[in-house]
């Protein structure tokens, strides 16, 4: 369905037919714009940025490119098309028509999930607020801004659901989305990873590789929801998410490429003296972002997750393609957990293990990109392998929280951990070094900071020296 851009709030949900809802959202809109001005990309309101804007939600329409001033970006409400035949695919309500409204008994559960999802979107924009100042190229600056505006739109997607289906509570939750802030000690964002700083571009690329990928898996599970408007919102959000992970994978890949080039050329491991990021430091950043993102899947054994599934509000990744009964009442699933200070495998009811199952899908997906990075390192003739740490490494949420575990999965004493942790996680000195490389933004078209290789191709096939951002 085409999107109506003539309206104050572009949408494909026939917003003008519901004046109350339209007015409520038009009321929220200036508050969103104030938030964008105060907490969004710093000092960018005059820039013209070569952005992709969705003009329809079908496969041809969501990738339209042109220069846009970011505050004029048309944030709007876009849901994937409705399938009138759609049925709930799992849980106690399996086979019933998908809900077009919120069933009373699911109200608080759905609201909670939508709020948790929505909260991450502005959080990530806040985390990335200052990165534009140190962008390694115009290409990277443009990608950062593309991600920022799309996260803003993903907030709109959740705020629409809150306003349209949750009455006064929903409107209050929508306000609160703009009142919590990443890292704010009094009003923090809901989930741990979204209160961490993203102070440099290595962190940004790791975040978009690992944390945005949690977004992919959570959105895919919500795209299975029996609540059809949520499913349709998430389905369209997923099309945008792919680019964010692409930025992460290629960003880390380009840093690795540059490092390997310098190692080869100068026959040394000591690339810090050459102004690049050494491989062990990149591995430490990977360890940090992977484990913080694993926490986002929640407890290994979770009754919350079981209830979401049984009620039909949150499914599994690609639920309809799984060949089983989609009820899981008699199934079990093997998880790793902790007993007497040891990591053990244990079969638990499959319904309780849904967070862990999704985490496993996620880990398998993360591993694919690491394999591609390693192939590139190998092709460069360097003997080094990046690895994903064990799922129990440095966890703050779930069964492994508080346990000291090495990246290889060995349980350690506090003394062993303290003696080694600086080899596994970024130290203050590592962070200070990486920060020291983040000089003033590189703004000459076609030029790149010294520590990162250029991309293989431009956005929308633009030439290498394309002017992705005009500063005016
Ligand atoms: N930090 O039974 P459990 C994205 C809480 S990212 C803090 O396991 P559940 C994006 C939990 O809330 C995707 N607290 O919970 C990426 C619960 O609290 P209560 C975001 C945490 O509900 C990049 C308690 O611990 N979307 O889109 O099964 C850029 C018990 O845990 C954490 C979603 O997350 C944590 N990490 O699982 C931009 C989807 N983990 O009830 C965007 C919606 C758990 O005891 N959310 N807790 O007070 C959910 O599906 C679930 O809320 C979770 C947690 C999977 C997060």
Image (cartoon, grey):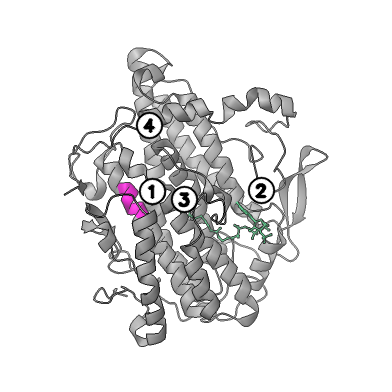
Nearest to the observer: residue 44 or residue 121: 44
Callout 1 crowding tier (Cα within 10 Å): few <14, some 14–19, many ≥20: many
- Residue 272 sits above or below residue 196 on the image: above
Measure the alpha-carbon separation of dots 4 and 3.
19 Å
Q: Nearer the viewer, mark 1 or mark 4?
A: 1
Please check the rendered image and state whether residue 142 is part of the magenta-colored stretch, yes or no: no
Q: Residue at x 69, y 56 (%)?
A: 353
Give the extent of the magenta segment: 143-148
At mark 3, the secondary structure is helix
Is ligand 1 less than 8 Å from the beta carbon at label 3? yes
Q: Which residue is mark 1?
A: 129
Label ID, residue 212: 3
Query: Residue shown at 36%/59% (left/top)?
Result: 36
Quadrant of the rendered image containing residue 198:
top left
Badge 2 vs badge 4, beta-carbon distance below 8 Å: no
Numbered label attached to residue 255: 4
Left or right: where 49 falls relative to 277: left
Looking at the image, tell me whether mark 1 or mark 3 is earlier in sequence order.
1
Sequence order check, earlier mark of 1 and 2: 1
Distance from mark 2 CB to nearest ligand 1 atom below 8 Å: yes
Q: CA distance from mark 1 to mark 2?
A: 27 Å
Does residue 466 appear anywhere in the picture? yes
CA separation in Å, label 1 and label 3: 16 Å
Measuring from the top left, give residue 80's x and y in whole percent.
Answer: 40, 71
Residue neighbourhood size for the residue with mark 3, other residues' Cα within 10 Å, grouped as few (<14), some (14–19), many (≥20):
many
Q: Are marks 1 and 4 in contact (CB under 8 Å)?
A: no
Asked which quadrant contains residue 440, the reply is top left
Point 43% across, 16% down: residue: 269
Q: Residues within 10 Å of mark 2 (few under 14, many from 20)?
A: some
Q: Residue at x 64, y 42 (%)?
A: 395
Asked which secondary structure carries label 4, the reply is helix
């Amino acid at each position: 369905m085409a999107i109506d851009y003539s309206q104050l709030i572009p949408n494909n949900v026939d917003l003008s037919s519901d004046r109350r809802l339209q007015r409520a959202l038009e009321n929220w809109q200036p508050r969103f714009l104030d938030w964008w001005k105060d907490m969004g990309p710093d000092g960018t309101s005059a820039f013209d940025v070569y952005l992709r804007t969705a003009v329809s939600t079908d496969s041809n329409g969501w990738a339209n490119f042109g220069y846009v001033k970011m505050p004029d970006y048309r944030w709007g409400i876009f849901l994937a098309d409705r399938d009138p035949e759609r049925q709930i695919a799992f849980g106690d309500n399996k086979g019933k028509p998908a809900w077009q409204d919120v069933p009373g008994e699911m109200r608080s559960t759905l609201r909670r999930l939508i709020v948790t999802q929505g909260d991450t979107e502005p959080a990530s924009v806040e985390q990335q607020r200052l990165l534009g100042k140190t962008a390694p190229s115009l290409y990277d600056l443009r990608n950062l801004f593309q991600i920022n505006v799309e996260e803003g739109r993903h907030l709109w997607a959740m705020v629409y659901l809150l306003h349209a289906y949750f009455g006064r509570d929903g409107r209050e939750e929508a306000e609160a989305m703009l009142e919590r802030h990443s890292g704010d000690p009094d009003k923090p964002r809901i989930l741990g990873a979204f209160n961490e700083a993203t102070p440099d571009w290595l962190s940004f690329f790791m975040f978009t590789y690992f944390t945005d990928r949690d977004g992919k898996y959570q959105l895919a599970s919500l795209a299975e929801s029996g609540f059809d408007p949520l499913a349709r919102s998430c389905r369209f959000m997923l099309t945008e998410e792919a680019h964010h992970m692409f930025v992460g994978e290629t960003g880390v890949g380009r840093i690795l490429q540059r490092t390997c080039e310098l190692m080869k050329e100068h026959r040394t491991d000591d690339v810090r003296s050459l102004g690049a990021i050494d491989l062990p430091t990149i591995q430490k950043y990977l360890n940090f972002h992977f484990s913080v993102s694993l926490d986002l899947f929640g407890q290994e054994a979770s009754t919350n997750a079981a209830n979401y599934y049984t009620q039909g509000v949150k499914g599994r990744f690609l639920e309809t393609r799984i060949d089983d009964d989609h009820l899981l009442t008699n199934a079990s699933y093997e998880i790793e957990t902790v007993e007497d200070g040891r990591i053990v495998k244990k079969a638990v009811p499959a319904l309780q293990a849904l967070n862990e199952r999704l985490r496993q899908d996620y880990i398998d997906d993360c591993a694919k990109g690491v394999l591609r990075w390693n192939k590139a390192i190998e092709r460069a003739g360097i003997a080094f392998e990046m690895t994903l740490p064990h799922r129990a490494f440095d966890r703050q949420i779930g069964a492994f929280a508080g346990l000291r575990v090495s990246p290889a999965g060995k349980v350690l004493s506090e003394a062993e951990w303290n003696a080694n942790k600086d080899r596994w996680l970024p130290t203050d000195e590592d962070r200070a070094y990486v920060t020291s490389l983040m000089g003033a933004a590189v703004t000459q078209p076609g030029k790149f900071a010294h520590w990162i290789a250029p991309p293989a191709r431009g956005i929308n096939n633009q030439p290498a020296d394309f002017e992705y951002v005009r500063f005016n």
